[in-house]
Amino acid sequence: MAKRSRKFKNKKIRFVAIGAALATGAAVVALLPSANAADAKTPEQIMDLCNRAEVLNGKQQSISDFGGHPIAGPSFGSDNCDFVETNFETFNGPTEKASIDFPNCEPNATDPAKVSIAWESEVAQGKGKQITIVQGGSGGLLGVLTGSWSVHKSTLNMTTNSAKAGSKDTVEVPVGKVAHIEFTPKMQRMTGEWRVRIDAREATLATSATPEQNFVLQDVVEGPSMLAGAAGAPGVVDGVAKTVLEDC
């Protein structure tokens, strides 16, 4: 996917997500020396401009792509928006109970019990911290991110809501214990920037000239890491399943 390299000039604003603000999807606003308060945009406004870009991640859009209308609107909000990846990492997701309990708690039980435990865990596809604040635009922008997301090995299409992991395991349950399966999914996190540009406009009889405007907003997108499926079948979530034994 081609990316445009263009020097940001004239008046601009940079939103940087830092520390806890990044974790919650909030944005800390830092005005560059060349910006003034009149140019300030909220994260919602920047993402709306991106969603309504005439060219989004190198693809020419039509107004129908974001629910626009030639008369009633909305129309194009910016000339260009690109997502530029800056970091990618993997981490363990939350551990969850993935099966029912299998007890070996009978008063007269003397031997371990072998049981076959079928388990399944569904892992939600992550959303971008900033994408979620764009009403009605999340689907299109997540689709745009799929190109960047899929260059990483065994990843899930960003427009998919969830994926599953599961198996059927034989477990030995000691006397006086209750067994169940826990699953810890392997997750992925992609950090990047939405770079929005509104081109300079020359003066006309009805409007004044306007300088080029550039906006940058950092975003973080998370989702499950996937194992490749057999013979073209959909993959399953990568992760670790383990048997947990508790007292009766």
Image (cartoon, rainbow, N blue to C red):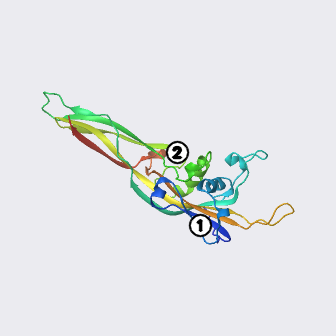
- Is residue 3 toward the left or the right of residue 156 in the image? right
172 with respect to 19 (left or right): left
**Residue 3: quadrant of the picture:** bottom right
Location of mark 2 (residue) = 160
| Residue 148 visible in this rendered orientation of the protein | yes
Residue neighbourhood size for the residue with mark 2, other residues' Cα within 10 Å, grouped as few (<14), some (14–19), many (≥20): some
Nearer the observer, 148 or 50: 50
Q: Residue at x 30, y 40 (%)?
A: 181
Rendered residue at 32%/43% (across/down): 182
Q: Amino acid at mark 2?
A: Thr
How far across and how far down the image is residue 193, in percent?
A: 56, 61
Discs 2/1, front: 1
* CA gap, disc 2 and disc 1: 36 Å
Mark 2 vs 1, N-terminal side: 1
Label 1 Cα crowd, 10 Å radius (few <14 / some 14-19 / many 20+): some
Q: Is residue 181 left or right of residue 60?
A: left
In percent of the image, x 60 and y 49: which residue is there? 134
Q: Quadrant of the C terminus?
A: top left
Seen in the picture, residue 27 relative to 123 is either above or below; the reply is below
Name the element at disc 1.
Answer: loop
Label 2 secondary element? loop
- What x and y, as percent, mark residue 130? 55, 53
Tell me where residue 115 appears, x and y as whole percent: 25, 34
**Image check: 240 left or right of 22?**
left
Percent of width and height locating residue 159 = 55, 47
Q: What residue is shown with label 1?
A: 31
Quarter-wise, where is residue 179 in the image? top left
